[in-house]
Image: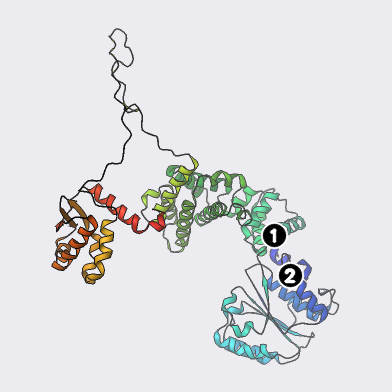
Amino acid sequence: MYQALYRKYRPQIFDDVVGQRSVTETLKAQLTTGRLSHAYLFTGTRGTGKTSCAKILAKAVNCEHPHDGNPCNDCPSCRAIDAGSCMDVLEIDAASNNGVDNVRALRDDAVYSPAQVRMRVYIIDEVHMLSTAAFNALLKIIEEPPAHLLFILATTELYKVPATILSRCQRFSFRRLLPEDIAGRLNYVAYQEGIPVEPEALDLLARLADGALRDGLSLLDQCASGATGTLTAQEVYRCLGLAGDRKTAQLMEAVAGRDAARALELFAGLYAGGKDVAAMAGELTSLARDLLILKTAPKSGASMVSGVCTDREVAGLLDRFSAGELLRITARLQETASGFSKSADRRLDMELCLLELCAPELQLDAESLNARLTRLEQQLASGRLTVAPPSDDGWDDDRPPFPGDEDEPGGPALPPPEPAPRRAAPTQAAPTASELPIGFWTDLVQAVGPQLLPSLRSFLPGVRPQLQGDTLVLAVETPFVQKMVDTPQAMGLIRAKAAELLGRPVAVRVAVGNGAPEGEDRFQALLDFGRQHGDIFDIK
């Protein structure tokens, strides 16, 4: 019967464990000196060697001929533990044995001396799945176990383990494996199995494993069984249903060029070819994340990228996006991918997502507006977008040619038009009596607001003041607001403060509607807002 590669090549001694040197060296030193703890807690992500080290430790404490802390794997104890026939070494899955009755039975059996080996070992995998009552039942036996008893707990979610258990165990953290470590181990396994594989395929599998060697071996097993010859990167993409770095880069190029038709064509071709929609969304998300990291941290970000695309493809895309755009793209892709589990049509969801990525003007949310603004700022800063200065001759450069600009055969040529006089440069007009000083209304509201009732004070920021001769017109939106503002107390305070700010007496009245042109209203509102928030926009 065929045995999966991750089972066939499970480490048998500490020296075979990949990427966890700090853990294995400490355990070997404890075994050599005899300073073993009664309880260990192995924590880390999946596929990093927690259960493998637990089994090696169980063999090492019972090995009859250990060598530098490693088990010999030849003595009867080691062979019995490897075969699973040793009744004194038990591996328990806490996910299916998480009740208090299961832990009580374990606690009752643990007091008996081992029958075949020196120490009775309990390996409890996924210990965080135990119930609160089960943890309480396990607490006493872990705190004061018999001399012949050893507990090895393993978990991927450390925060779910009670602090009372953590304080009674020696904790070892298993880190994610580096891609080069995974690629080296995959190369060794491929050589042992006689699998022809290219280095690019090994690097791709190592990146897809995401720090878990078991995942990398499973992917190698899957691709090797589906490949017809030498395992290449393209064969890996085909066997796993992925779009590939080139197609992913082309999709991102279409997004950068705002070419929705091109993006939909590429997606339709990949979908027709059997590519998984969720996998394509994941690849696009990884590429957007890589670009965002390199955009934010160009020097130190190279060590943090996932490598879903080659360095040359990433460099070609990096200058085409701003940080705001990449942030919006990454968030939108994540939102789409998270909804796949509840979606009735993943293809439609992904097509809508691509349309929104290519056309941010379709969305009016803050992230889309920020992405458009940052893109303009980046183009202005790089010089790719410039504003043409006005012509000095007074004529429009884009005007159609006058009749007679070019002589027509057989017809008289019209004389060229006389040049218009050169326009003088615009100068700042002197303020007139109908203009209000900048920040006039803001200063007035701040002065009279504390003297008014809160119900009235809340309407004043929405008033649009206009000076018409010797009358200050307060434009409001509705008759209700007019009724609230047009009170003797408010009018008296506003009239007195306005005369103080303007330096002359004025009359005050409240009018519904817009007494001034809309452009002047908006400009005055922007000036008031800039004065109020000048510390943010650096407006003096």
- Where residue 473 appears, as percent x and y from the top left, is 17, 55
Of pointers 1 and 2, the one earlier in the residue sequence: 2
Three-letter amino acid code at the position of disc 1: Ile
Q: Quadrant of the N terminus?
A: bottom right
The residue under the point 36% across, 29% down is: 392
- Where residue 328 appears, as percent x and y from the top left, is 45, 55
- Where residue 101 appears, as percent x and y from the top left, is 58, 89
Task: Say which of 206 and 258 sits in front.
Answer: 258
Three-letter amino acid code at the position of disc 2: Ser
Separation of marks 1 and 2 at Cα, in angstroms = 17 Å
* Residue 239 in sight in this render: yes
The local crowd at label 1, few if under 14, some if 14 to 19, many if 20 or more residues have their Cα within 10 Å, is many
Horizontally, residue 149 falls left or right of residue 335, namely right
The local crowd at label 2, few if under 14, some if 14 to 19, many if 20 or more residues have their Cα within 10 Å, is few
* Residue 306 in sight in this render: no
Residue sitting farthest toward the front: 503
- Where residue 386 appears, as percent x and y from the top left, is 43, 38
Count of numbered circles in the view: 2
The residue under the point 67% across, 89% down is: 143
Horizontally, residue 79 falls left or right of residue 490, namely right
Task: Say which of 347 and 473 sits in front.
Answer: 473
Residue at which label 1 appears: 182
Label 1 element class:
helix
| Quarter where residue 149 is shown | bottom right
Residue at which label 2 appears: 22
Task: Say which of 311 and 390 sits in front.
Answer: 390
Front tag of 1 and 2: 2
Label 2 element class:
helix
